[in-house]
Amino acid sequence: MSDRLTAQMAFLNEACKLKSVTRGTQLCDGSRYENSGEHSWHIALYALTLSEHAPEGVSIHRVIQMLLLHDLVEIDAGDAPIFGDHDPAEMAELEQAAATRIFGLLPPDQAAAFRALWDEFEANETPDAQFAKSLDRFQPPNQNLASGGGSWVDYDTQWDQFETRVAAKIANGAPSLWDWLRPRAAAWFKANR
């Protein structure tokens, strides 16, 4: 028992480092950039709050688990802003290595279970993962709208980039959320780009 608890505490202490990873998205009030720990908590709260918008059969419990785990790899790999300039293949390699290291801190049964959830989220093939991925893409635009443009201004984002990199992911797993967001985002881009 003490070896198991020691391993679990090593993982939890390592996870605390996520609070030091700065993201490319500002808080809703525009006062500062959020950290990845705040982002993970916030989208888990999105899942809990917006669960009625999930497609039939989606397990919100599993979605919340995925969302709490999905960005832990940023401890090693850093944040890759969706409108930033980075090599996706290189980032995927860094994230895979980070997942192996970070989840490997846990007892073997938990390591396998957490890694399986992370892999499922990354693959974006199951309804649970698709809804989780949609929420991960849905939250930043809402913060951008609340903060006067946020990362859209920072990265000089255009509507076609937004549609290509964000819209499809939201619409895939949460069409009703995309239907709600689309006119709001379109109005911002029309007024500001």
Image: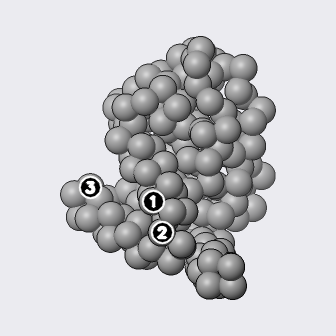
Asked if the residue at tag 2 contacts the one at tag 1, i.e. Cβ–Cβ closer than 8 Å, the answer is: yes
Q: Amino acid at mark 3?
A: Pro
**Label 1 secondary element:** helix
**Label 3 secondary element:** helix
Display colour scheme? one colour
Q: What residue did someone put label 3 on?
A: 88
Q: Nearer the viewer, mark 2 or mark 3?
A: 2
Q: What residue did someone put label 2 on?
A: 108
Q: Give the CA distance from mark 2 to mark 3.
A: 29 Å
Give percent across and percent down for residue 154: 50, 55
Q: What residue did someone put label 1 on?
A: 112
Residue 51 lies in what quarter of the image? top right
| Residue positioned 51% across, 63% down in the render | 109
Q: Nearer the viewer, mark 1 or mark 3?
A: 1
Dot 3, how many residues are within 10 Å of its Cα: few (below 14), some (14-19), or many (20+)? few
Q: Amino acid at mark 2?
A: Pro
Give percent across and percent down for residue 94: 31, 69
Q: Mark 1 or mark 3: which comes first in sequence?
A: 3
Dot 2, how many residues are within 10 Å of its Cα: few (below 14), some (14-19), or many (20+)? few
Q: Give the CA distance from mark 1 to mark 3.
A: 25 Å
Q: Specify whether 58 is left or right of 118.
A: right
Q: Amino acid at mark 1?
A: Ala
